[in-house]
Image: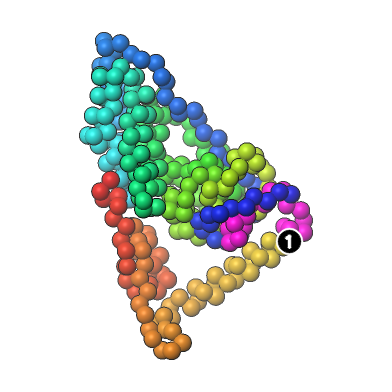
Amino acid sequence: MKTLIVEKTASGGFTMGRAFVVNRNNLSADTYRIESKDADTEIAKYQKAVREATAQLEELAKTSDIFAAHFEMVQDPALYAGVTDKITSESQNAQLALENTTAEFAAIFDSMEDEYMKERGADVRDVRDRLMRSLKGITQNVLEGIHDKVILVAEDLSPSDTSNINLDFVLGFATELGGVTSHVSIIARNLELPALVGVKGLMEEVKSDDFLILDASNGKVILDPDEETIQKYKALEEEYRKHKKELEALSSLPATTLDGKTVKVYANVGNLEDVKKAVHRGIEGIGLFRSEFLYM
């Protein structure tokens, strides 16, 4: 039995089960330089990748604000100009031009002080990966092997990753990278699933089918637990579930303090699904509408 201590709890709770470790395709760009006569060919490759990515995102964008932003981003004139300029002026092949241009875009978000906006660099990298898969002719979905309930373990998870998962099979999330405002953190909170992010050494320690306990209330990942620990956490999981039901039963009551002062409780929302959940929990209004994606 081994325990990894985690500093960032993205979504609280307890769960246990087998790990499904996400092993990604190699999406590093080819680094060869091109001759000037080949520039048009490389631009045509990139244009084809944009068309394919746009077609993929068009359907996803109908039900997701995140993918609506990706849909706009993949067609962004500034992105297109950056890639094609590197092809024509710097003799970079299409893959390398895409990698370098998106690195510049992502760096803008990475340098921001606001934690939520900083995490949006991950969206730029997700768009890059979608385009890169097209340029490399990669069609395999690395998450297609999930057919049973598992704890999803990955270096990080992008919006495109989670769109390919049947979330009914996910017991919880653990990632080596990411923060509490990352996409996987938001997904986990919306689904009320346990999630730990920024777990140092996770990918080195955990293999697919390892049995894990995810203690997202106390910041622990327990590998290969003994029977005593399993029974302890089964009891904690049941206690946590009962406590949540008790709180849900109280959610429709007015938020009144012991001295008789009633306050209004508003929700932070980013889409219609967030609004529906807020109404279900008795929230009285919207305190913050996350409009960032409208300007990306």
User: Depth check: 8 or 72 in front?
Assistant: 8
> Residue 56 falls in which quadrant of the image?
top left
* Residue 292, image x, y percentages: 30, 52
> Residue 153 falls in which quadrant of the image?
top right
User: Depth check: 280 or 112 in front?
Assistant: 112
Residue behind mark 1: 231
Coloration of the structure image: rainbow
Which segment did they paint magenta?
Answer: 214-231
* Residue 267, image x, y percentages: 36, 67
User: Depth check: 41 or 39 in front?
Assistant: 39
What's the residue at 57%, 47% (across, down)?
A: 199
Q: Work out whether residue 119 can be spotted.
A: yes
Please check the rendered image and state whether residue 249 is part of the magenta-colored stretch, yes or no: no
What's the residue at 29%, 19% (across, down)?
A: 90
User: Depth check: 126 or 200 in front?
Assistant: 200
Please check the rendered image and state whether residue 229 is part of the magenta-colored stretch, yes or no: yes
